Amino acid sequence: MTLRVGIARDERFLEHKTGHFHPEHPKRLETVYRMIDRHFKDRLIAVPPEPATLEQMERIHTQAYIKRILKTADQRITSLAPDTPISADSYLAAWLAAGACIKGVDSLMDLDCDAFFALIRPPGHHALPDRASGFCLFNNIAIAAQYALDRHHLRRILVIDWDIHHGNGIHDIFYNSREVLYFSTHDLLLFPYSGELTQTGGESAPGYTVNVPITRELTDADMIYLYREILRPVIKGYQPQLIMVAAGFDAHTDDPIGRSRLTEATYRGITRLLMDLRSVADKPPLFFALEGGYHQRALADSIQAILTELLSDQASEPPDTPQSPEIVDLVANVRSIHSSYGVFHD
């Protein structure tokens, strides 16, 4: 089934300057935007972004931190964290990125589209309520998820984070919430070195956080198997009203930071899986927001694969290589740990 797909893009996201040698630089989006123009002209629904409101931002971030970001306006490149530079117009790009995600939620909830991709920067999944972290200024997905809870009265949002780095910001913000179930696959040996398998949610939300540390040796077939065997019972049991994806692409084999073995086939395969699994819930809309991914061609190819799948009425062929015994054991371990919480339903 072909979905109506919306995207948010804006040249102002390119105004977040990070310096010549920083991996999170404007050329990432420039390459993606050229790919969109080349392959998807007149096939996507434009959802023009607007900056988030102060009230929307304050639902996640502290007033003091927001003021700190605003004070960087018109400054030359400085740093909010050792790895997070900021420049004169970074505050506007970050404010607009959060707003783009909010507009995406509205477009999905108002039935203007079935799927949405926020092609934004700076990324957000490491940002904490009171500080920047890991190239991230504001936590775009957390802000949009909270907005969906507040404005659209949703009560069950599934956030899937396939960036190779653990999204510690989203994880911590919703760790005690049953209204947002967070599922992450990530490499524990990479920043922020968090997301242990045994971290399954706070006292008021046990089982509503699913952390799955992975190794760099996983293949496309391994990853798709892992997602299928975990997400099917999660979606069936949780019945999400909205599925949000923190879409980082630094697990791609060509990425200089992630150094893993995955290709765009993983992202295409998981996208098709999510399209199919909508049927075991009440067809929740699909939301994607760009996080990491630092090899320009690999980033563009991966996003192209996702958009092609969303727009296709025929499923792509999954990788034909068998999954490894290690991934079968990992999935069994995850399901065993979560078996007592009642979130997984076979």
Image: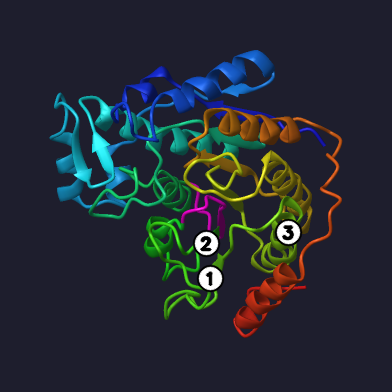
**Among numbered discs 3 and 2, the one appearing first in the sequence:** 2
The residue that appears at 55% across and 24% down in the rendered structure is: 32
Q: Quadrant of the N terminus?
A: top right
Residue type, label 2 = Tyr
Using the rendered image of the protein, determine whether residue 48 is visible from the camera's viewpoint.
Answer: yes
Query: What residue span does the magenta drawing correspond to?
Result: 152-165
Residue 214, given in percent of the width and then of the height, sits at: 58, 63
- Badge 3: residue crowd in 10 Å (few <14, some 14–19, many ≥20): many
**Among numbered discs 2 and 1, the one appearing first in the sequence:** 2
Residue type, label 1 = Tyr
The residues bearing labels 3 and 2 have C-alpha atoms spaced at a distance of: 21 Å
Checking the image for residue 222, the label placed there is 3
Checking the image for residue 269, the label placed there is none
Tell me, yes or no, whether the highlighted magenta stretch contains residue 134. Answer: no
The residue that appears at 44% across and 21% down in the rendered structure is: 10
Q: Nearer the viewer, mark 3 or mark 2?
A: 3
Residue type, label 3 = Asp
The answer to whether residue 210 is above or below residue 131 is below
Q: Which residue is mark 2?
A: 182
Residue 70, given in percent of the width and then of the height, sits at: 17, 35
Q: Are marks 2 and 1 in contact (CB under 8 Å)?
A: yes
What main secondary structure does the magenta stretch of the protein show? Answer: loop
Q: Which residue is mark 1?
A: 208
The residue that appears at 47% across and 42% down in the rendered structure is: 292
The residues bearing labels 2 and 1 have C-alpha atoms spaced at a distance of: 7 Å
**Among numbered discs 3 and 1, the one appearing first in the sequence:** 1
Query: Is 51 situated left or right of 70 in this image?
Result: right
- Badge 1: residue crowd in 10 Å (few <14, some 14–19, many ≥20): many
